[in-house]
Amino acid sequence: MTLVQIFEAWLWSFGASACFAVFFNAEKRDIVLSAVLGSIGWIVYLAFKSSGGAESIGYFAGAFSVAVFAEILAIVLHRPATVYLIPGITPLVPGGGIFFMMRGVVRGEFSEALSAGYGALATAVAIALGIAIASSTARIVAIAVKGKQHKIMEETDMSVQLPEDVDNPSSLQ
């Protein structure tokens, strides 16, 4: 794959993700970040595909990378991960496979329809698994970090002690 082809793929996936972010009424900074995530996911997919790996593994890796970065952005920017995730996976969605499946059904070419449908299903499952594993891992890490912070606060006794007579306004004078 040449550098020009990589740039072209990056540009088209960036544009597709940005358009979907605009369609979903994302804020301006979220549009750019979602588009970058879409580009990252598509480039990861192309890297796996061009290296001779299974296409489903490429879709899994692309969706996983988008989901991991969406979770990181959600934590850093205090936004929901779906703001970045939905437009970010848009370039990976198997629209072409579903189209070819339906075209095969309409034309009566059932073996072509079955083949395209199976490919689209495998792609959808790979994308769903990539997102599910990344999101679950992020939740487990977040719970572990919060648990560790809570344990540290208990050990150092950093809790706030309020006076007993806070409810009595005359004692505050």
Image: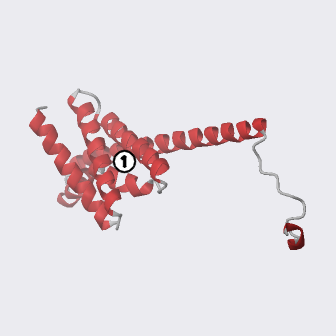
Residue 9 higher or lower than 17, as above or below: above
What is the x, y in percent for residue 152? Answer: 71, 36
The residue located at (52%, 42%) in the rendering is: 138
Q: Residue furthest front?
A: 173
Q: Residue furthest bottom?
A: 170
Nearer to me, 92 or 29? 29
Mark 1 highlights which residue? Answer: 124
Residue 84 higher or lower than 151, as above or below: below
Label 1 Cα crowd, 10 Å radius (few <14 / some 14-19 / many 20+): some
For the N terminus, which image quadrant?
Answer: top left
Nearer to me, 96 or 1? 1
The quarter of the displayed image where residue 52 is located: top left
What is the x, y in percent for residue 49? Answer: 24, 33
The quarter of the displayed image where residue 86 is located: bottom left
What is the x, y in percent for residue 11? Answer: 17, 48
Nearer to me, 52 or 30? 30
Residue 164, visible in the rendered structure: yes
Nearer to me, 144 or 50? 144
Please give left or right for residue 94 compared with residue 127 in the image. Answer: left
Residue 117, visible in the rendered structure: no
The residue located at (32%, 47%) in the rendering is: 37
What is the x, y in percent for residue 8? Answer: 13, 44
Asked which secondary structure carries label 1, the reply is helix
The residue located at (43%, 48%) in the rendering is: 73
The amino acid on which the numbered mark 1 sits, given as a three-letter code, is Ala
